[in-house]
Amino acid sequence: MQPAPDPHSAPTGPVPAAPRAEPLPVPDRATVFERFGARIRGLPGPDDLWHWLAPALVTLLAAVLRLANLAHPHAFVFDETYYAKDAWTLAHLGYESRWPEGADEAFLAGDTMTFLAEGSFVVHPPLGKWLIALGFGAFGADTAWGWRVATALAGTAAVLVLILIARRLTGSTLWASIAGLLLAIDGLGIVLGRVALLDGFLMLFVLLAFWFVLIDRDSVRTRIALAASDPEAPSWGPVLWSRPWVLAAGAALGTATAVKWSGLYVLAAVGIYLVVTDALARRRAGITRWLPDAAVRQGPATFLLLVPVAAIVYLTSWTGWLVSAGGYDRDSDTNPLIALWNYHRATYNFHIGLTSGHSYASPAWQWPLLLRPTSMFWEKTEQGTDGCALAGGCVQAISSIPNPLIWYSAIAAVVFLAVRLAWPGGGRLRDWRSAFVLSGVAATYVPWLLYAERTIFQFYTVVMIPFLVLALVLTLRRIAGAPTETPDRRTSGQGVVAAFLLIVIAVSVFWYPLWTAIEVPYEFWRLHNWMLGWI
């Protein structure tokens, strides 16, 4: 018995095994868009208020959750002690410099000019710190707003970009808004949008790259289909050089890499994804030599569109170090580019040798299980101290733990989509949307499995969580039911989804104080220690 067609899967036509015996008629542009660009018709028009209002409200919610009381606590939270002060010296010297003993206390007290002229050995590229420095320009250094506002705005923008990605994937503003809502209220997204670390910027630029790739996909499939339908077309497909969205993706990934080197893994993954999807688009269009066509002919063109622009953007981010004289290792060679290469070698050796212990270190194999989230800030005051009137004392905490229900459900959704995609002979079960989302998960997670001995942290998964949310939304969409299913089936499915979302919101409300350092009773804090590793 043949399996029933999947209402959510993209249509798959027969693949010719040999060149066409008779040329097919050239379809007009409307026909091609009917076959290959149907999702474009589902995008909102300028007069469709709901399609613009819902994403705007979700984005506004994300902004409120990230910006409210952002200056609290007035302290360096976790690695803010490095990134905030590095951003300050970048703004003044063009490079990161060293600070004397007691610099944290002096900086927080308003004495921000005690930095030294000597360059500091910094192991991450400078762009994320330049972005933090923009906040100093707007708000100064006498408030934590100055060093946190840039990450808050980046986290808010990431929610909007995720909505745009989800709308292209599903053709539905409702499901896109649900995706944005899940990221907006997730703890990991909130915390990394309220603390001046680099990973929130990395998440935004990676999401932008995947959004650009998704836009490119629609255009390329249409152009390949038009070219292949020409009766005079050879068995080879077109080599497409005019792909501005691939250039944009390269620029976004160069920017991501200029924040943290892990952006390189995503750059490589996106390059592979583009070649594979180009091959499948040519196969579907009936091009006989579709695989070598995509790999050997289109592949080099795609590489030249994607990688050089990423390299240029990355190198540009080092301008401050290159044009100044005091940066670390700047004098290692008279040629500034060779000196920069020397600095990169030293940084690489640091990264591969980073095995020093840390009480909140968590190897990547633990991440799906959520065994050791990072406690970034914790402060307890006893009764009668600093306004605490509770017998058990009061606690202020910032934990990078995501919303546990979103996290575990999304991990289950990833497994579900992966099984469907890999099921032997399950062509009808396969969906390009699942492949897109799983590519994002793999690009942002799998490389970390190579570093079992390196000191890494659970909060690195903030770059992965938008793709986990997309996997969860695709799965919830299946649970809710397709329009072709019976009304009873859809009613029950939609009820399950609605109940799930209400519980998710309740869990976020329960955890929000521990994501934002709101003072709570000590016993309330203890209620959140569901595992020993969550303390």
Image: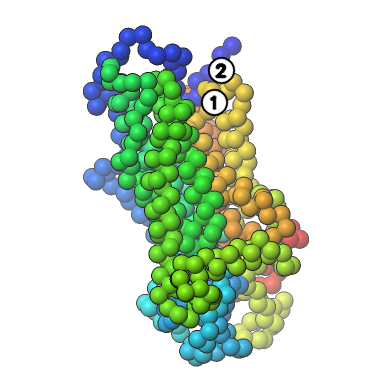
Three-letter code, disc 2? Pro
For disc 2, the neighbor class at 10 Å (few under 14, some 14 to 19, many from 20) is: few
Q: Look at the image and name its color scheme.
A: rainbow
> Where the C terminus falls, by quadrant?
bottom right
Q: Position of residue 439 (x, y in %)?
A: 53, 41
* Image vertical order of residue 32 relative to residue 49, above or below: above
401 vs 356, left or right, is left
Q: Which residue corresponds to mark 1?
A: 429
Q: Position of residue 408 (x, y in %)?
A: 63, 47
Work out whether residue 90 or residue 161 is closer to the camera in this orientation and state it: 90
- Whether residue 144 is visible, yes or no, is no
> Where the N terminus falls, by quadrant?
top right
* Residue under the point 61% across and 26% down: 423
Q: Position of residue 15 (x, y in %)?
A: 45, 18
266 vs 358, left or right, is left
Q: Secondary structure at mark 2?
A: loop
* Image vertical order of residue 8 relative to residue 200, above or below: above
Q: CA distance from mark 2 to mark 1?
A: 9 Å
* Image vertical order of residue 215 relative to residue 8, above or below: below
* Residue under the point 37% across and 12% down: 20
Going from N to C along the chain, the mark reached first, 2 or 1, is 2
Work out whether residue 300 or residue 27 is closer to the camera in this orientation and state it: 300
Q: Secondary structure at mark 1?
A: helix
* Residue under the point 50% across and 70% down: 339
Count of all numbered marks drawn on residues in the image: 2
Disc 2 vs disc 1: Cβ atoms closer than 8 Å?
yes
Three-letter code, disc 1? Leu
View extreme (right): residue: 532
* Image vertical order of residue 146 relative to residue 160, above or below: below
Q: Position of residue 75 (x, y in %)?
A: 56, 80
- Whether residue 344 is visible, yes or no, is yes
Q: Which residue corresponds to mark 2?
A: 3
